[in-house]
Structure formats: C-alpha cells, structure tokens
Image: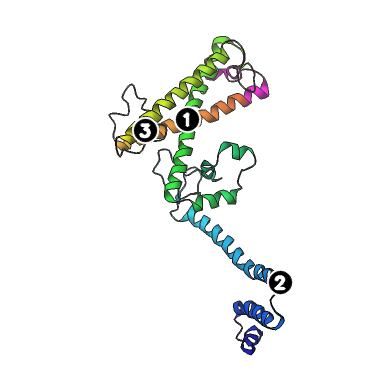
Amino acid sequence: RLSMLSLASPAASGFAPLRGPALLLTELSTVGFDARAYRAKMQKLSAPLRAAARTADRLAATVCMSDTARKALWKPGAVAPSYLDGTLAGDAGFDPLTLTALASKSLPDLLTGGWPSQSQRELIMARMTPTERRAAVAKMREAEIRHARLAMLAAAGWPLSELLQGGRAPSVLNGGLGDGPVPFFLVLAAGAAAYVEYLSEEAANQASGLGPAAPRLAGDFGFDPLGVMAEEGAYRRKELSANELFNGRLAMLAITGFAAQEFLWGTPVVEQTPFFFGR
C-alpha cells in the first residue's frame, strides 16, 4: 500500500499516466469496492483514450487524402484526394466535398436524415479498403456518365423543341410534362433506358460466368455501331472517353442554365439568346 501511495504522490517521479490508476487502487484497498464509483472512475480514466482515438481517426482521414497527393486540375493549388489517382478518363481530382463516400449509402437512408457531415464522409473514405474505394469511385463515375449523356441529349432537344413548336420547353419548372405526347415519350424513354441497362447487366453476368474477364468500364454498354472505339488503342480510347465526359459536364451546366433562365425570365431560351440559334 505504501508503494502505491508513493506512486500516487505528486512528488513521485512525475510520471502522470500512473497517477490515476495508482490512486484508484489505493482507494479500493482502503475504502473497499464500490461498483458505481469504479465505473465512474474508469470512464474518467478512459476519456483521454477515447479522445486520442478520435484524433487518430481524423489523422487517418487526412492521410487518406494526402498519402499519394497529386495536383488537381480543376483549381490551381488544389490537391486531388488519393482515391482519384488519374487512372480514369477525365479525372481532374474534383471531389472537394468527399461525395464519393455517399456511394455506400442508400437513397432512402440519405433522404430520411442519414446524410453524413464532411468530417464523417472523410472518415468513411479513410476506413474503406482499396477495393471498396475503387468500387465507390466506379459507382459515382457510372452515375456521372449517365447524367452527362442525358444532359447532352437534353441540351440539344430543349432548344430544338422551342424552335420547332414555339414557347418554352416542357420541364419541371416550366410545367407541361403532362401535356400531349410528353408523358408517353417519358415512359418510352424510361423503358428504353431500362432495357439498355438490362442488356448490359446480362452481358456482364454471362462474361463473369465464362471465367475471368476484363473489368467493365463505367458507362460501357457496348454501344459503338460505327466502330469508333474498336479500332483505337488504349490511350486514344481514354482520350475519347474524356472528351465525352467533358462535353457531358458542359451539357449539365447548360441544361441547368436553360432551366434557370426560363424560370427567372419566363421566355424561351432561344429568344433570350437568338444569336446562338440563327435568329
């Protein structure tokens, strides 16, 4: 008991980590065991360890973002996160909000309040294995390229519909989605997209059943009727895929601008910028 008291004494060697446990043992030996007090003491003693664990998690997230740092192309001086290593076509290292972490979340979970904060998203990425990170990036790239292709069709179809029939194009903000043949066309387009998705999944399943196969590229549905990609090498294919993405990203900005302009000014976009449409 004297040795424990000497360890607990401030004058003893000054080794702080032993002071708390020594005091606890001294109290147990002199007063007796009290379960409630013991739990309170243990929680108090373990608080620094829990804080250290949280700090380690934050440091791990920081290391995840900077262990293989490369320059991001979207902003001067910006650093791309480690999971965007430049292997994908059109990879500019752009993910300032760490939205790739949401690939592991279901849509119902996100809609019902399960949206993680920025620090939580960084921790999610830090705790992923390399295989899980690649899968998350591939899932987000698949979503991006689908939106890009849809936006390219919309950016062409929106002004064409206004040039051919006059007035504003049907949209969520403009209304008119339930008028005339528009609902039928929407159902037809959704059915065609679902059928293409089905064919792609079937082809992937058959290829996996026949043995090891090359990993499927995001957005590759085997649609190349003119053989543009078939005769090109790997470098040129990546370049063509990047060009498709660049045009798709520009189209997403354009279609957002169309919708905002017509909602704010109430006139067709072809009338607001007639010099773009030969007027």
* Front-lying residue, 89 or 57: 57
Determine the CA span between mark 3 and mark 2: 60 Å
Q: Residue at x 48, y 54 (%)?
A: 64
Q: Nearer the viewer, mark 3 or mark 2?
A: 2
The residue singled out by tag 3 in the image is 205
Amino acid at dot 1: Arg
Residue 146, numbered circle? 1
Q: How crowded is the residue under tag 1: few (<14 C-alpha within 10 Å), some, or many (20+)? A: some
Measure how far apart labels 1 and 2 are at the Cα level: 60 Å
Q: Tell me, yes or no, if residue 279 can be seen here.
A: no
Can residue 248 be seen from the camera position used here?
A: yes
Which comes sooner in the sequence, label 1 or label 2?
A: 2
Q: Which coloring applies here? A: rainbow
Residue at label 2? 37
Coordinates of residue 126 in the picture (x, y in percent)? 50, 53
* Left or right: 30, with 59 as reference point: right
Magenta extent: 260-279
> For numbered disc 3, what is the local secondary structure?
helix
What type is the residue that disc 3 sits on?
Answer: Asn
Front residue (pair 144, 209) = 209
Q: Name the residue furthest bottom.
A: 2
Query: Percent x, y for residue 188?
Result: 50, 17
Which residue occupies the foreground of this view, 58 or 243?
58
Which callout, 1 or 2, points to the residue nearer the camera?
2
Q: For the residues marked 3 and 1, what is the alpha-carbon distance in whole angstroms? A: 21 Å
Sequence-wise, the earlier of marks 3 and 2 is: 2
Rendering quarter of residue 9:
bottom right
